[in-house]
Image (cartoon, rainbow, N blue to C red):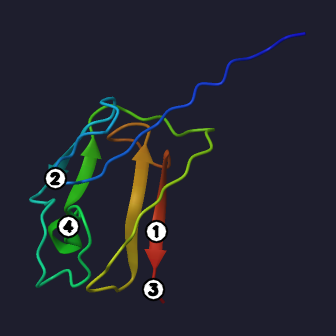
Amino acid sequence: ATSTATTITYVLWSFDNVTTDLYGNYNGELVNGATCTVSSSTIPYLGQGYPLGLTSSLNQSFQVSTFLNLASTSFTIEAWIYSTVVTGDNGIMGQCDCTSCENKCFFFFDSIQ
């Protein structure tokens, strides 16, 4: 009998005022002034921790520095999203094979019609 080993990769970004992966493998950085801070004036439902704050008009994002290959892989994305302004398509997550290629990307969108 032939057996194969399955590699399980765990990644967790809590955004509790940090951009590091809990397991230390896929740390990220905030782009174009994105924040990990609490503001009760803009986020009325505060629990524990810090939210990742992004403004689409400023092209803000969270970028993972080590490539996390999700091709041909089952994965789960879990997020609580509170949008203050929602029009058109809003990207939730995206990945590309390279920085300058076309048609080699996949994206998850929250689309309001």
Relative horizontal placement of residue 107, taking residue 25 as reference (left or right): right
State the residue at coordinates (61%, 39%).
Answer: 73
**Disc 4/disc 1 C-alpha distance (Å):** 17 Å
**Label 1 CA crowd tier, 10 Å (few <14, some 14–19, many 20+):** few
- Which residue is disc 2 drawn over? 31
Q: Secondary structure at mark 1?
A: strand
Farthest-out residue, right: 1
Q: Amino acid at mark 4?
A: Gly
Mark linked to residue 112: 3
Q: Who comes first in sequence, dot 3 or dot 2?
A: 2
Q: Amino acid at mark 3?
A: Ile
**Label 2 CA crowd tier, 10 Å (few <14, some 14–19, many 20+):** some
Q: Are marks 2 and 4 in contact (CB under 8 Å)?
A: no
Q: Amino acid at mark 2?
A: Val
- Which residue is disc 1 drawn over? 109
Q: Secondary structure at mark 3?
A: loop
